[in-house]
Image: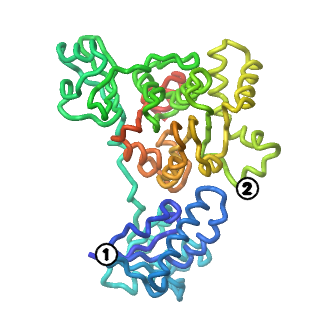
Amino acid sequence: MKKIFILDTNVLIHDPNCIFDFKDNDVYIPIYVIEEIDRLKNYNDYVGKSAREASRNIDSLREKGTLANGIINEEGGEFRILLGDHELEYLPDAFSKTLADNKIIAMALKQKNENKETKVVLISKDMNVRIKADVLGLDTMDYVKDKLDIVTLYSGNRTIELESNEFDLIYKAPAVNYSLLLDQEPLANEMFKFTCKGKSVLGIYKKEREKIEKTVFSESLLWGISGRNTEQKEAIELLMDQRIKIVSLMGVAGTGKTLLAIASALEQVVERKLYKKIFIARPVIPMGKDIGYLPGSEKEKMRPWMHPIYDNIEFLVTNKQTSGSNDTEKVIVGLESMGLLKVEPLTYIRGRSIPQGFIIIDEAQNLTPHEIKTIITRVGKDTKIVLTGDPYQIDSPYLNENSNGLSYMAERLKDEPLAGHMTLVKGERSDVSELASKLL
């Protein structure tokens, strides 16, 4: 049955192309949403970029007709901008008549009253808007196009018990056809721990060769550290393999995802010179005008927000050189002055094409799927990008463990030869950190 979907502003910010995704259903956008988009378009971050892109998409439809009267798409659905007309009368006195959210809800209520035979659904990523709409008898839902089930999310690795004759194949040879060990073809760059009678061997599936290869880098020493558990060793294999250009690392606090990413970057840029520079960014950094309120240079403004990154670098430098903190600071300054290390706001990285670089996006669970796509499309030739994060620790009010960009990317790229994913489970920071991650 044909439905009328009314979109909240946050849906357009989350996915500027969403207006094209409802097929033969009608899509209505309240004029208040357009006003909010107009206000947000000047932001110097992904919100502003999404607002501008949403505006361009809506403006492109004007060539097909008048937005206020409705434009019919190829599948029979209608797109329309709703103008205000006494819709506030539908709000109870307990609701503020000046809030944009309430005005949008009022417009949806009016559409429901005027379209008795058609189901009207308000789409919003704001849970409070959904709660208020539900209280008023409106059908409401989250925008679920890019949602997935975190419980069944691809983990990137498997442990398989083999018979002695099968185990000997992978134990003695550098590579084995997957059909000799498995019933079905694995996913590209899927990691395996094969075990047999107390012995084990790690392998990775190379889709282009249709073979499971024994790991080459899993036991590597990266700037004084090595993998402490199976998942960390498997993550190192993905991080150090130059054939894999996109790596996503998920895990709760203390599993070592950020430390391993930075250690592998330092190893490949400083020691092996496989890449020219390390770029590091965290999307939780307040961008645009927020950063301007802090005194000092760009680096001084960035320092408070990037402390976790510098803490990891200091740990690695100290661990490698067994030196004091003063020498550690000199090494970091030296790396930056030589152009080997650059910590930048996410906005700056997104706007560039970065060749021969090693990019680390930390706390990537706070990115939307659209922003993930935008960042990855900036990756230049011979560049590797690593995204780390914990999908259960999300700061954005409109994202959760099922809809964030990191989870979305891991699932969508799980069978691509250029991509690899690993979920880190065991905490290695400390016993206290491990206990807190499990029980609190």
Does residue 127 show up?
A: no
Q: How many marks?
A: 2
Q: Residues within 10 Å of mark 1 (few under 14, many from 20)?
A: few
Residue 31 vs residue 345: left or right? Answer: left
The residue under the point 33% across, 32% down is: 190
* Disc 2 residue crowd, few under 14, some 14–19, many 20+, Cα 10 Å: few
Residue 149 location, x and y as percent?
Answer: 35, 47
Which quarter of the picture shows residue 138? bottom left
* Residue corresponding to mark 1: 75
The quarter of the picture where the N terminus appears is: bottom left
- Residue 254 spot, x, y in % from top left: 52, 28
Q: Residue shown at 53%/88% (left/top)?
A: 86
How is colour applied across the structure in the image?
rainbow
Work out how far the residue at label 1 is from the one at label 2, CA to CA, in angstroms.
43 Å
Residue indicated by mark 2: 289
**Front tag of 1 and 2:** 1
Residue in the image at 54% along x and 20% along y: 222
Q: What residue type is labelled 2?
A: Lys
Q: Where is residue 114 in the image (x, y as percent from the top left)?
A: 39, 87
For residue 27, above or below residue 218: below
Residue farthest to the front, as pictured: 381
Is residue 159 shown above or below 282? above
